[in-house]
Image (spheres, rainbow, N blue to C red):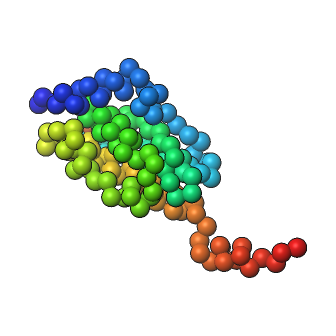
Amino acid sequence: MPYSRKVIDRFEDVLKNPAKHSVGRFNPNDADVATGMVGAPACGDVMRLQLKMVGNIIDDVKFKTYGCGSAIASSSLFIGMLKGRTIESAKQIKDKDIAEALELPSIKLHCSVLAEESIKKAIENWESKQPSLSEQLQEDLEPIE
Ligand code: FES
């Protein structure tokens, strides 16, 4: 099963220049960091994606993928699509956008699904870190001393 030139070039560049491709981690306990961790049931590969937020904007992204070349290339491409987007806009990126851009063969489509799942999980984590509406109302109603 041949990989496309795009997968090979991106995968090799990630290995050579991990910092350029945002490989790494933020502290998951920071209030402005959201973390999504997912595994691919088909093969056992794992991806961790982290967003650093400024308000509702994805200011920076880090990832670490323990997986095949397609998964690493997909992760890297995905990271480039996320920076500067809002959460709502990030939700619109689909695994098929990544698979098409990298010309993934059908047997490797689950590798791009891993990238899409990781952003879903990170967004869930981000939303769980936000104060609920009732908590915000409570804060607004606190008496000013
Ligand atoms: Fe597991 Fe690609 S073979 S993510």
Residue sitting nearer the eye, 7 or 144: 144
**Viewport quadrant of the N terminus:** top left
Q: Is residue 79 left or right of residue 142?
A: left
Residue 68 found in image quarter: top left
Q: Is residue 104 above or below residue 124?
A: above
Residue sitting nearer the eye, 20 or 127: 20
Q: Residue at x 47, y 39 (%)?
A: 62
Image coords of residue 87 (percent x, y): 44, 58
Give the number of marks.
Answer: 0
Residue sitting nearer the eye, 78 or 134: 78
**Viewport quadrant of the C terminus:** bottom right
Q: Is residue 45 visible?
A: no
Q: Residue at x 21, y 38 (%)?
A: 102
Q: Is residue 87 left or right of residue 131?
A: left
Image coords of residue 116 (percent x, y): 33, 50
Image coords of residue 115 (percent x, y): 33, 46
Q: Residue at x 57, y 52 (%)?
A: 54
Image coords of residue 138 (percent x, y): 70, 77
Residue furthest out toward the top? 16
Residue sitting nearer the eye, 86 or 7: 86
Residue 63 found in image quarter: top left
Residue furthest out toward the front? 84
Question: On the rendering, which quadrant does ligand 1 occupy?
Answer: top left
Q: Residue at x 26, y 25 (%)?
A: 9
Q: Is residue 2 above or below residue 144?
A: above
Residue furthest out toward the right? 145
Q: Is residue 5 visible?
A: yes
Q: Is residue 131 above or below residue 21?
A: below
